[in-house]
Amino acid sequence: MKLPGQDAIARQADEHLVTHRVKLPRKLVEHPIRQVGKRLSMALVVLLATAFIVYADHDGYNDNSDGSVDLLDAFYYATVTLSTTGYGDITPVSDAARLTNIFVITPLRVLFLIILVGTTLEALTERTREEWRLNRWRSALRDHTVVVGFGTKGRSAVQTVCATGLRKEQVVVVDPSGKAIEAATAHGYAGVVGDATRSDVLNRAEVFRAKQIIIATQRDDTAVLVTLTARQLNRGAKIVVAVREEENAPLLKQSGADAVITSASAAGRLLGLSVLSPAAGMVMEDLISQGSGLDIVERPVIKAEVGKTPRETDDLVVSVVRGHRVLGYDDPTVGGLELTDRLITIVRATPATHVAPDARPLPRD
């Protein structure tokens, strides 16, 4: 297994300096500073419009100091009027000016106050609301699924798990790319921006309370480090890891992974099967695509099936999980089914057959 070079180590050190944060699914909103700037611009437009309206009818106003109202006086009057200060030194005296105040200036005053007060309240409460939402999310998060890496493998894995009935609120995605986390939150998943090889980043994803962890990083050495860190933080979670090279699978097992999927070899075997039998390749592709066609599900043995052989059950049983062993349906050691056994069956996918996979980690030798 090749270790990263000095350039990669330096790049990882720079990435550690990036502030990691939790992002919950929500509608896209503008940055608070941009929102304040936009609303201040709107307030300035209202002020200018009011000043020019007053100046256009300056003959209908009286200034106690000199009797006339010029452009500066119009801006002064607009300012004190919209801010509800109202010193009374400049007043509308004509009927037209008073009607303009009733039907134009007063609505502009209300609009001006709404813009400023609304901006102030939103700026003051935005962070508090987000912190409250984040704390509530953390307190409610239990037995969730953590997905490290939201590339092609990570997205496909979480889609498959959600197709079996897992709610999107129970999925947390960890990825160093901000764009990947934005894509995850757009799909309804919570996200943590940061390097998953660091324990503080995984802690932000509440990995110590997770039920299952899916690791789908781009590099095998990164997968090893993430697996070691995740297993140290959570001894009971089921950890499934994807690697590129088959020679790295034993190292992942030693690092604490319950299952290791060699993506390159799996794709190659599916390609070979499709060459030998395109129909068989289509069936295999259907089986590993949850939610449509045929699905492979794992379920417990019911009381009515105890003592029967796998072939005597109503479902199409392909394997029996007994303890930490996975036995074929035709294995003579299976004998009669036991209540503690679990069956791996092939079923027709319908909305009613969404069966969440068992997340109990099998004992490791």
Image (cartoon, grey):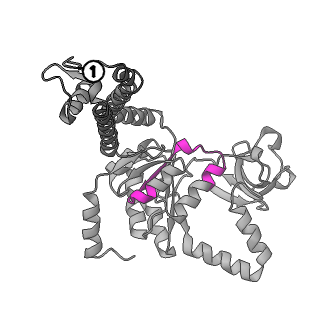
Q: Which residue is mark 1?
A: 84
Task: Let me know if residue 61 appears in the view.
Answer: yes
Asked if 349 appears above or below 152 in the picture, the reply is: above
Local secondary structure at mark 1 = loop
Q: Is residue 193 left or right of residue 75?
A: right
Q: Is residue 46 left or right of residue 326?
A: left
Viewer-side residue, 137 vs 321: 137
Asked if 198 appears above or below 356 in the picture, the reply is: below
Over which residues does the magenta segment extend?
A: 160-181
Q: Position of residue 272 (x, y in %)?
A: 68, 81
Task: Name the amino acid type tagged 1.
Answer: Thr
Task: Residue 161: say if magenta.
Answer: yes
Task: Residue 163: say if magenta.
Answer: yes
Viewer-side residue, 165 vs 257: 165
**Quadrant where the N terminus is found in the figure:** bottom left
Quarter assignment of residue 334: bottom right
| Residue depicted at x 49% and y 75% | 245
| Residue depicted at x 35% and y 48% | 21
Q: Position of residue 37 (x, y in %)?
A: 30, 43
Q: Is residue 93 left or right of residue 284?
A: left
Viewer-side residue, 54 vs 60: 60
Task: Let me know if residue 256 appears in the view.
Answer: no
Q: Position of residue 239 (x, y in %)?
A: 50, 54
Which residue lies most toward the left here? 65
Asked if 168 appears above or below 58 in the picture, the reply is: below
Viewer-side residue, 60 vs 31: 60
User: Counting other residues with Cα less than 10 Å from the Cα at mark 1, is it few (<14), some (14-19), or many (20 or more)?
Assistant: few
